[in-house]
Amino acid sequence: MAARARGSVWEIQPGDVGAAGLAAAEAGAFLAALRSAAAAAGPGAPGDAVWAAVAAAGVLRPEHPHALHQLVYYSVYAGWDRAARGPPPYWFPSPIDCKQTNLGRLMEENGPKLLGPSYKDPISSFNRFYRFSVENQEVYWSMVLKQLAVKFQQEPKAILSTSDRSNKGGTWLQGAVLNIAECCLLPCPSLKRTDDSTAIIWRDEGLDDHPVNRMSLKELRSQVITVANALDTMFQKGDRIAIDMPMTCDAVIIYLAIVLGGFVVVSIADSFAPQEIGTRMAVSKAKAIFTQDFIIRGGKKVPLYSRVVQGTSSKAVVIPATGGYLGVTLRNGDVSWKDFLSRAAGRSSIYSAAYQSADAITNILFSSGTTGEPKAIPWTQLAPIRCAADTWAHLDVQPQDIGCWPTNLGWVMGPIILYSCFLNGATLALYHGSPLGRDFCKFVQDAGVTVLGSVPSLVKSWKAGNYAKGLDWTKIRVLGTTGEASDIDDNLWLTSRTSYKPIVECCGGTELASSYIQGSLLQPQAFGAFSGASMSTGFVILDEQGTPYPDDVPCAGEVGLFPLYFGATNWLLNADHNEVYFDGMPIYKGRQLRRHGDIVQRTVGGYYIVQGRADDTMNLGGIKTSSVEIERVCNRADEGLLETAAVSIKRAGGGPEHLAILAVLKDRSAQYDVNLLKSKFQRAIQKNLNPLFKVSYVKIVPEFPRTASNKLLRRVLRDQLKQELSNHSKL
């Protein structure tokens, strides 16, 4: 149970500290240290100054109970007026450390030249430098390209050409020739990457007390060349080859080999049913598929090859999940991993990479397919560069880092973390198993992970099980999160485990190869909020008439992206790109804006909060709001709640929208009074959001429907509720 927050940090008493789980013998010393740190902020200091002083003093430690972190954080900010001041920040950039970040070094070196005498330092000049990157993209990208392990066989004639007006996104790196997989595999002196550098660290589930495994860059390159040689015996250059398996070392090797050899990866998530596999194979016209016999999760063997066989008749290369032998009988025409690799025997260990133009396709990914057929999104060689550049600038990935982001090559974060590590000279950390429990959390410690990415539901699982207890996560220097709206208290737990390192919120899309909006280590960070657009990305927030709000005005509306966007796709395999992304969007400064579909709020203080997709907004009593806004408030209404989902439904005969809230409990077997829960939701919404919003219906459910990439399917919940309530007068 969380300790009750006080009206200010000065009102916290020894009994409060004890109730938060700290031993009585430690309470006095803790309170003295807390008050000393708070006093250092100065008399009458605002909450952000007090919190900055408390965090800097290290009063709160990772081993302290979460309830103690809650007590202090919520007490410090008890009097904070969000309406007047915006979201309260929990992390502040250091004037000294900021100059050691990737972006800070770039600014220190180039800021005076580019911004003139007004340049001061990376923190105070950040906003001006960001605007410069939007208005002078050729200059920005020419600088950033030099920071990455990107090796051109032919240098680009120009960074950006806008002469072809039919190409709304512009032509990038015109004339450039390269192989982006080769860039990942070669030593790079500027990044201090040698053949002996560790490229991958991994561990298999079930071997959690064993040392982690390591693969050098030379070993990785050798194995990629072996697979590329075997591919050459079976396929023609340009053929599309699918990967449907967990993100293991073998999967990463196969991915790089396909791209190195001049073939095209088709990304399919390992959670899909046979029909979904078949759809993606057909849409992409894939010639073959790499898969596993089983998936090992939580000690259980989940069939995978059998799903692939049901989904497609294309040739399959099948890898054993454990050991050297397959646990399934292959159908005629399919090939075991061992037999596939034997095809490379006798071929040269020196491989000639397939060099192609920058706009050559390397990967076909798919949207999550929440409505109809999933969009088939082709990535060119520009997309990996954008991945690496964004994590270089915003997550500050550096050569000494060890990056871990539990995901799958079927989803955009798989290729993003792969390229982010290899093109920045960092080490990729992979856990061959479920990321939900303590075993994964221990791997993070044992691998020495320094950049850890997640999705909110993962953090929720780690927190609910207290899986980081007793583990040392203090080597982590930056955290990332994406996929859905973050929960403030879950993120408080997450950052507290790392001694309050920054969490970089990221929100983008597969078709952008990046995040259009995210946090920065050169700006203060607030829980569940984005501190700005990504570097070189411009956007506006549109009102209901499609007119952009002024850039410095708090507002909420649909986001419109500036179309000149490095790495963004400019066509779709199975849909009209212009129709999906441009038709109906307004013209802004002479160019048509690009649609993304998010509703974004710009707060007082200049933070941004993504309020969900445009179709997840609702009109309650004539006031537009979003599901995400309501869920943020309701998630903290009762200690027994794991998560909530807010949807609006209408009576069959029409009329106004009614608010329904569905809830998942931490303890699925617990008995809860739904009416009591409804009144708690009502009070929380009236106090924290809008006194006019009325909760009409509450239901407890065992779990929420989600896409395979873990996005909440509110549309499905809405349809289920409509069906359920159609014969009742519940509303």
Image (cartoon, rainbow, N blue to C red):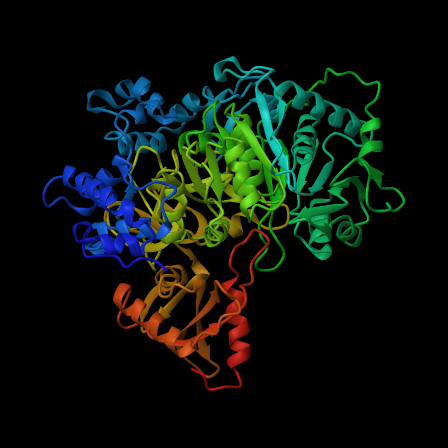
Asked if 278 appears above or below 419 in the picture, the reply is below
> Image check: 644 left or right of 570?
left
> Image check: 54 left or right of 448?
left
**Image quadrant occupied by the N terminus:** bottom left
Q: Residue at x 56, y 62 (%)?
A: 705
Q: Residue at x 50, y 25 (%)?
A: 424
Asked if 698 appears above or below 586 in the picture, the reply is below
Camera sees residue 570: no
Asked if 2 appears above or below 260 in the picture, the reply is below
Which quadrant holds residue 433? top right
- Could you say which is closer to the camera, residue 47 or residue 605? 47
- Could you say which is closer to the camera, residue 459 or residue 335? 459
Residue extending furthest front?
25
Q: Where's residue 220, x and y in %?
A: 66, 24
**Image quadrant occupied by the C terminus:** bottom left
Q: How many marks?
A: 0
Q: Where's residue 642, x and y in %?
A: 45, 61
Residue extending furthest left?
43
Residue extending furthest right?
332
Q: Where's residue 704, x and y in %?
A: 53, 63
Q: Residue at x 26, y 19 (%)?
A: 112
Asked if 562 appears above or below 252 in the picture, the reply is below
> Image check: 373 left or right of 393?
right
Which quadrant holds residue 202? top right
- Could you say which is closer to the camera, residue 575 or residue 290? 290
Q: Where's residue 296, x and y in %?
A: 69, 46
Camera sees residue 478: yes
